[in-house]
Amino acid sequence: MNETLKGKIAMLPDSPGCYMMKERGQIIYVGKAVNLKNRVRSYFHASSHTPKVEAMVSHIDDFDILLCRTNLEALILECNLIKLHRPYYNILLKDDKHYPYIRMDLRDPYPKAEMSRRLEKDGARYFGPYIGAGAVKDVLETVRRMFPLRTCSTVFPLKKPQRPCINYEIGRCLGPCGGKCTDEEYRRTVDRVLAFLGGSDSEILDALKNEMAAAAAAYKYERAAVIRDKIRDIEGMMQRQQAIQTRGGDEDVIALARDDMDAMAQVLLIRDGKMVGGDAFELPGEGREDPAEVLFDFALQYYDSRKPAREVLIADVPEEIRADLEAWLRERREGACTLLVPQRGEKRALVLMSEKNARDALEKRNSRKQIQYERTVGACRDLADAIGMKGYPKRIEGYDISNTQGMLSVASMVVFIDGEPAKGEYRRYRIKTVEGANDFASLNEVLLRRFTRAMSEDPDEKWPMPDLVLIDGGPEQLAFAREAMLSTGADVPMFGLAKKREEIFLPGRDEPVILDHHTPALHLIQRVRDESHRYAITFHRSLRTADSVRSRLEEIPGIGPERRKALVKHFGSAKAVSRASEEDLAAVKGMTRPAARAVYAHFHPAGGEES
C-alpha cells in the first residue's frame, strides 16, 4: 500500500456509507458497507480473496468515501454511483430495454390494440409485460384475427365517412371509418378484447360457442366455421399463457448459474399467476464470486430501470442486507413489495426453474462463444499454422482492384481484427499512376501507398502495421504486391488466394497450400477476400454513377466548366445536382434562371420520370 492508502484506512469511520476505489483518479469499483472501517480494511488485510477482488485490489491506489445515515441510504447511493460512473469491476447490465405491453386507449372513440414500450399513466389500459416484441406481435395477430378492431392511424371523429380499407373487405375490421358499424357494436368487440387480454376466456368462449350454434341452426355454415376457428385460436392462446399457473398475483423470480469464469442471472416474470416469459443476463467475470452478493448487486442494477412485481423471489441474498433490499424495492415500486428467499414448496420450485433456465442460457452462451471463437480467433490460429507463421495474425488486411475496361480504377483495403470485420479501419483508393486495366501495377501502387503510411515517422500520418496481408489473386499479383511492400522497408507475411480452387500462394513456394473446404481457416480468408471484393465493387459503382451524372452535365447547353464546378461544389456531388429543384439551382453563384431551368429540365424531362 502507498502512503495515501495507509493514511485513509487509518482514519476510516465506523459508519454506513459508500466507498469508491480508484486507479489513477478513475473510479474502478463502487461498494457500500454497514461499517466502512471494517469493510474497506478487509480489502487490504484479508488473506484470501476471489480472483476478481484480487485483480481489483492490485490496481487500487486511492479511494474516497461518502457517509450515509442508514444502510438503506447507502444502498440507494451505491446504485446511483454505479449508474453514474459505470466502474469496471462492478456488475454492469448493458440491457436497458423495457418489456413491451399491449395498450388500448379507451378514450379513443374507436380504440385499437397496439404495442407500447412504456407503461404510462395516461388513462389507457395496459396488458403485460410480454417477453419481447415477438410475443406481443403473436398476441396482437391472434387478437386481430379473432376480433375485427381497426389497426389504422385514422383520427376520429371524421368530418364525413370515408371508404373502408382492405381490412374491412376481408373481415379484419368493423369499418367504423365508413359507418359500417354502430358505436355499441364496436364497443362490444372492445369489451371482448379487454376480457381476453385480461385472461378471462370462459365468458368469451361461451358467447362464441352460442354464436356458432346459432349460425349452424340457421344453416349459416360458413359463418359457423369462422367462429369455430376463432374458438380454437382463443383456446390455443390461453393454453400457451398458462404454462405455469400459481395462486395468482405478480412475481419476479431471480436465480443464478455460474461456471469458473462467468455467471448468468435469470428472471422469470409471472403476471396474474401465469408465466409470461423471462430473460437471462450475462454477468462476465462473476463466476467465482459469492452468489448471494452477485444476486444482490444484480437486483440493484435490474430494478434501477424497472418496477418490481408485488413479490420478488430470489435464490439467495445476504441476510444482513435483506431488509434493506426489500425497503429499496418498495421505493422502486412505490407500493407494497415482498422479498422472499424460499426454501421449500411451490415458490422454491419456481426458483429452481429459474436456476434451470439460467444454466441452460449459460450453456448456450458458452456454446455460441466456442463457435464464435472457432470462426474468428481459432481460425486465425489455424491459418497461422497452415502457412507457417510463428504467432497468430491479429490484424489481417485484404486488397482487391475494381475497374470497367480500365476506367475509374479503384482499390479496397478491408481489415479483420481477431477474425472479425473492423469496418472503421477500411480504406478506399483511387488509382492515380496506372493507365488502363492493369491489376498488377494497380496493386503495386496501392501497397506502396499503404506501407509508406505504415513506415511514416509522422505520428499523424502513420498507420498500424498488419500481421498478415491477403491479395486476391495468384503468384503474379502476389509478386507485384510484395515488391511494393518490401520497397518501403516493411516485411509482413503475405499470401495470395486464387479463386478457382481456393489455393493459397506463399512467397518463395512453388506449390500452393490447399485447405480443407470445411475448415474455419479457409472460411475466414474467404470472408476477407469476399469483403474486399464487395468493398471495391461498391466504391467503383458509386464513382461510375457519379461520373455518369457528371458526363450528363456536360451535355447541357450553357453549362460550361465553371458552372459545372460551382454546381458540384454547392450540392456536394453531381448526383445531388440532378435531384435539386429549379429554385435551388438558380440560387447557386454564377447560375441564371434560364441556366437553372435548362439543368432542371435535363434531369426532369416533361411528362417523364426523373432520370
Image (tube, helix red, strand yellow):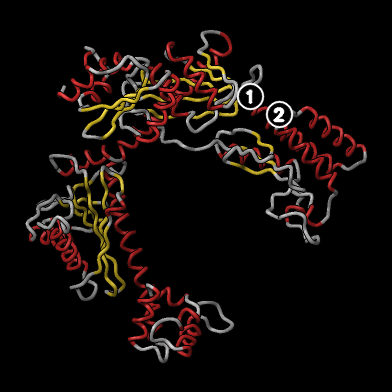
**In which quadrant is the N terminus drawn?**
top left
Q: Nearer the viewer, residue 162 or 312?
A: 312
Picture coordinates of residue 97, whole percent (x, y): 49, 38
Kind of residue at disc 2: Gly
Identify the residue at image location x=79%, y=31%.
205
On the rendered structure, is 441 left or right of 90?
A: left
The label on residue 282 is none
- Along the polypeptide, which appears first: circle 2 or circle 1? 2
The local crowd at label 1, few if under 14, some if 14 to 19, many if 20 or more residues have their Cα within 10 Å, is many
Q: Is residue 181 above or below residue 65?
A: below
* Above or below: residue 102 compared with residue 447: above
**Viewer-side residue, 493 vs 9:** 9
When asked about the image quadrant of residue 284, the answer is top left
| Relative horizontal placement of residue 369, taking residue 494 as reference (left or right) | right
Residue on which disc 2 sits: 199
Residue type at tag 1: Lys
Q: Mark 1 highlights which residue?
A: 274
Does the rendering let one see residue 363?
no
Q: Is residue 66 visible?
A: yes
Residue at horizontal 20 percent and vertical 58 percent from the top: 474
Task: Determine which quarter of the picture holds residue 475.
Answer: bottom left
> Looking at the image, is 184 positioned above or below residue 277?
below
The residue positioned 73% from the left and 33% from the top of the image is 196
Q: How many numbered marks, from 0 up?
A: 2
Q: Is residue 128 above or below residue 350?
A: below
Residue 214 placement: quadrant? top right
CA gap between label 2 and label 1 equals 9 Å
**What is the x, y in percent for residue 9?**
23, 19
The answer to whether the residues at label 2 and label 1 have Cβ atoms under 8 Å apart is yes
| Viewer-closest of 430 and 456 | 456
Q: Position of residue 466 (x, y in %)?
A: 18, 50
Q: Residue at x 30, y 45 (%)?
A: 420
